[in-house]
Amino acid sequence: MQTPVGSAPEREQTSAAAASQHRRHAARHRPPVRAWLQPAVIALIVATAFVSCYVGLQRNPQPHQIPLAVAGPGLPDAIHEALGDSVEVRPVADAQAARQALEGHDVVAALSAEGPHQLRLEVAGANGTSTTTVVKSLVGAYAHGAGERVTTEDVVPFDHYDARGLAGFYMAFGVTLAGFVLGSNVLGLAGLLLLRHRFWLLAGASVAIGSVASIIAGPVLGAVPAPVLPLIFTLALLAAAAAFTTKLLGTYLGPVGVPVATLLLLTVGNATSGATIGADLLPAAARTVSALLPPGAAVRAVTDLSYFDGAHAAVPVLTLALWAVIAALLLGMRSRLTRQRAAAPA
């Protein structure tokens, strides 16, 4: 006897086929494992790096070759023997030469013999609280062991409205963050604006960021005593360095580029900038990258412009310019190569 159409066995076969088709359809549209893992892993890496850098670098800072101008008969050798590699002793002719080296930002402190069993220590508080505190502690330990008395004077103190010396760091951090946000947003404009228009946007907005930050921190709040125009130029370069670098990494690395920029600029760059903890107290690896990354270069330039008449500002400003220019050139090179490939015959 034949099984009638629509019988139970046939309905079961139809149901099984539909279920199989549904499973295949679901498998095709199920998000890949990478879609779940990548955001979580990147977030964990950023959190780990941020906490490790900011907390780890300040956990046990150690002085290393802190430049100290020393004047007095036999005093340079005695300091070197007592303090070892903690300081870099720079012998000078007299107390006046030591102070000139300090005010010129060639050293972070000046030590001289003021009389029998009497030392005079001059520090530049503008070098950072952590650095000056360590110098005072080191010289104090030497004086205690040698039976000397120490008189200390801060000859380059922080501005009245920046008692803790953090204004430069927060200003550099804010400008770096603004440049990072600018670069990451311009990444999404590739289909709307030509490359040269995106470059004009990055450059113009960077100048605006630097100008606003400089005017607020300088004339308005009075916390950063640097001359306004050099400060604007420095911060505009910092914003441009952060913006062009973020766009470069996003263009070359795709979705991973923005997190890499976060790690490079906002995490490692700001943690090693030398503002919250002096560069002379950082571990060797952190000291190496500190002056090479945009935030560290900017903090150095701002400090020099604010308190040392721009004595050594040229090198960090050049560093910022190189970051911005090299990133822009690499972006332009990639765009040209992309056009050449598109125009090449198949």
Image: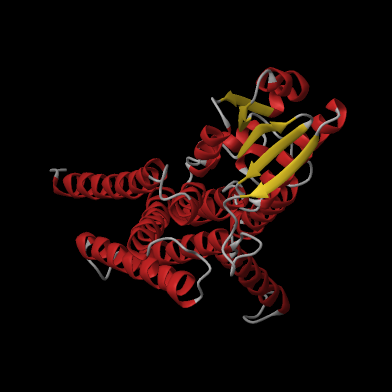
At a point 34% along the width and 58% down the height, the residue shown is: 230
- As rendered, which of 86 and 259 lies closer to the eye? 86
Residue 95, position in %: x, y?
A: 58, 34
Q: Is residue 158 left or right of residue 8?
A: left
- As rendered, which of 134 and 22 lies closer to the eye? 134
Q: Is residue 219 left or right of residue 65?
A: left
**Rendered view: 14 above or below 310:** below
Residue 266, position in %: x, y?
A: 55, 56
Q: Is residue 257 left or right of residue 113?
A: left
Split into 4 quadrants, where in the image is the C terminus?
top left
| Residue 316 quadrant | top left
At a point 69% along the width and 23% down the height, the residue shown is: 85
Q: Is residue 62 visible?
A: yes
Say how many tags the image has: 0
Split into 4 quadrants, where in the image is the N terminus?
bottom right
Residue 20, position in %: x, y?
A: 63, 65
| Residue 333 quadrant | top left
Q: Is residue 57 visible?
A: no
**Rendered view: 77 above or below 287:** above
